[in-house]
Amino acid sequence: MDIKAADVKALRDVTGAGMMECKKALVECNGDAAAAEKLLKEKGLAAVAKRAERATAEGRIFIKQEGTKAVIVEINCETDFVAKNADFIALGNEIAAVAFEKGYTTVTDELKNMLLDLATKIRENMSVRRLELIEAPADCVVSKYIHSDGKTGVVTVIKADPAAAVENADVKAFGYDCCLHIAAFTPAFLRREDVSEEYIAEQRGIFKAQMDNDEKMAGKPDNVKEGILNGKINKHLAEICFLDQAFVKDDKVSVSKKMEMVGKDAGAKLALDKAVTFILGA
């Protein structure tokens, strides 16, 4: 039968399928656009299923935050080209918004299904890999940051006493700067107390072996060696623990010291309550 070019183009605009595929579908469905659209979607979903085993090493991090509530989501795709696609980014923000509004704490079928139409059109394997919901009390400042490449996202929660300090502009700015800091330096731990004894023991063993092989250490008294070893451990912890690291906006002070200073100026005591970091694929 005679299929008009305008009908083929209209079907392509709706489904994202190729011109020849659209024409074949219209012919097969005797020109019925709705039936042709259904047929193409069925074929597309079958293709998506076939692609399910293909690696999804690219993607983006999305964050939806209002007040003291936030959700952070990682959505994966196969290529960096698709990760930068405007439709992919718009859908990612929509998925984060739905998860936020409905208070989802895990990836649901609803969120997974939201990807199907786009995956069918773009012909890439996609998945909602993970999400985390953050709900803080009223005495907290919740801040967010997504790096420009979309591959790192951070949410921080800073607790203030008294609670009125959460409205202080400098306190809010500090919360955002903490997100920037974590995204830039990706500390392995937030606090020293988060570091396991096993990890510290392993590092002590590494540093001790290095000292034992250092000729400059030969002949030094055991108590001196122990002091040097403890110093190396303290320095290492300061490098990997967020609160001990040099602050991103003022490297002359640690994050914890900067927090104390900001709190003092705001007439409050500040404390890190939580920090959530999503790094693509990590």
Image (cartoon, rainbow, N blue to C red):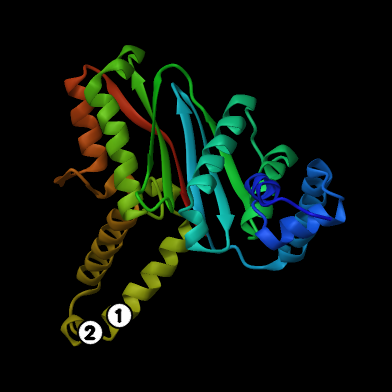
In terms of depth relative to the viewer, which is nearer, 273 or 179?
A: 179
Is there any visible trace of residue 8 in the rendered image? yes
Three-letter amino acid code of the residue under disc 1:
Gln
Residue 109 position, x and y percent, is 74, 41
Q: Under tag 1, what secondary structure?
A: helix
Q: Is residue 75 left or right of residue 162?
A: right
Against 208, residue 28 (above or below) is: above
Query: Where 116 falls versus 223 (above or below)?
Result: above
Residue 59 in the image: state x and y as whole percent: 52, 55
Q: Quadrant of residue 35?
A: top right
Q: Label 1 neighbourhood size at 10 Å, few (<14), some (14-19), many (20+)? A: few
Q: In the rendered view, does 55 fall on the left or right side of 1?
A: left
- Camera-side residue of 18 and 72: 18
Instruction: Tell me whether circle 2 and circle 1 mark residues in contact (CB < 8 Å).
Output: yes
Residue shown at 28%/62% (left/top)?
230
Q: Identify the residue at image location x=75%, y=62%.
A: 47
Check the image and report above or below for 217 versus 228. Answer: below
At horizontal 28% and vertical 23% (from top left) the residue drawn is 269
Q: Amino acid at mark 2?
A: Asp
Looking at the rendered structure, which numbered label has been put on residue 69?
none
**Few, some or many residues within 10 Å of mark 2 (<14, 14–19, 20+):** few
Q: How far separated are the C-alphas under marks 2 and 1?
A: 6 Å
Which residue occupies the foreground of this view, 39 or 205?
39
Residue under label 2, please give it: 214
Q: Name the residue that disc number 1 marks.
A: 210
